[in-house]
Amino acid sequence: MALIIVPSLAFCHNEGQSRQSNHNDTINESFVADVDIYITAKPSEVQLFEGQKTAVYIYQAELIKGESSSLQEIPNSYLGPIIRVKPQQKIRVRFNNELSDESIIHWHGLHVPHEMDGHPMHVIKTGEQYIYEFVVDNRPGTYWFHPHPHGQTGPQVYNGLAGLFIVEGDRSDLPTMEYEVPFVIQDRRFDSSNQLVYLENNMMDKMIGFLGNEIIINGESNTSKTVNKGTYRFRVLNGSNSRIYKIAWSDGANLTIIGNDGGLLPKPSDRPYMMLAPGERIDVWRDFSSEETNQEISLNSLAFDNGTSMGMMGGGRRGGGMMRGGGMMGGQRQPFRFLYR
Ligand SMILES: [Cu+2]
């Protein structure tokens, strides 16, 4: 017998509790924020493909106070901004909901008080504001934020609402600036008018979890990046709703993992591949300095058999299906174009 699972995000399990209007919409003047930002969730359009633009949701952000590096946009991406803070900094986020549905932001992986955690019971309606004020109480590492309204988390994330939340460390031996690259992996399905399709095959999708047929990186289709001969840190997030990835370098090099959900590892770990479930993060370190110029290297999503032997409940979620994601190129010029099937 198949267990029916609702295709909500696999990484958040506390939905479905009672909702009430007790949201926090006032600023605490005694909370002196180091970083203060507006974030507005709203509908928008992006040019993902030739022809018709794609309707998405975006987190539009504006820095009110703090270093300019506290808020970083990913160029050409509809994904949310990257919020960068340091341990023990005080952060205030003024969240405005301009979606037609209720929403709230959840800070995935952050240790925050209950009322700052974006629990579904704290959703706000269209036109309302929620004030978050909390101290960054996490180790340096890669975290993220996404909507968390009851019953709408899946579609709102799917339509584009997700952003990285980086707690910066003070390690001087790790790549920074242009050598520290956000890498958000998501699977999506588009119709012939370039519009996102969600729950196309409703019964099947509810049983196995919704899966897209195209991998996008940082909200961009057909992604590539030209890298220099140097060492890079990729902050990899599986921001997909249901898909699990088995990722590996195309050239057979080991994946050097330096961090995961809990921050930096005590020491780097070399693996031929890594499994990455929805919501999970890994920090991948790679040295391209000895690569041939104009070489093309990609980060592939390998096929794998993901039955119940993987410990997934109810039917299991399918594996990578030979889709490839996130081309990357050692050397200069000629950006790598990768193909999907
Ligand atoms: Cu989450």
Image (cartoon, helix red, strand yellow):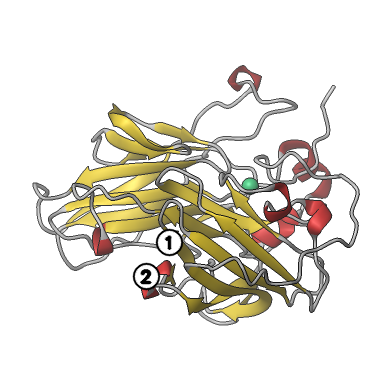
User: Percent x, y for residue 250?
Assistant: 29, 42
Q: Is residue 87 above or below residue 14?
A: below
Q: Residue at x 87, y 45 (%)?
A: 17
In this rendered view, identify the residue nearer to me: 212 or 218.
218
> How many residues crowd around disc 1 within 10 Å: few (fewer than 14), some, or many (20 or more)?
some
**Can see residue 221?**
no
Q: Residue at x 10, y 57 (%)?
A: 293
* Secondary structure beneath label 1: strand
Is there CB contact under 8 Å for labels 1 and 2? yes
Horizontal side of 9 relative to 125 (left or right) equals left
Which residue bears the numbered disc 2?
69
| Residue at image point 31% right, 37% down | 258
* Residue 213 visible (yes or no): yes
| Kind of residue at badge 1 | Arg
Question: How packed is label 2: few (under 14 Cα within 10 Å), some, or many (20 or more)?
Answer: few
Residue at x 79% of width, y 79% of height: 127
Q: Secondary structure at mark 2?
A: helix
Task: Give the amino acid type for the residue marked by disc 2 in the picture.
Answer: Ser
Separation of marks 1 and 2 at Cα, in angstroms: 7 Å
Q: Which residue is mark 1?
A: 84
- Residue 2 at what x, y percent from top left? 82, 26
| Relative image position of residue 74 (x, y in whole percent) | 42, 69
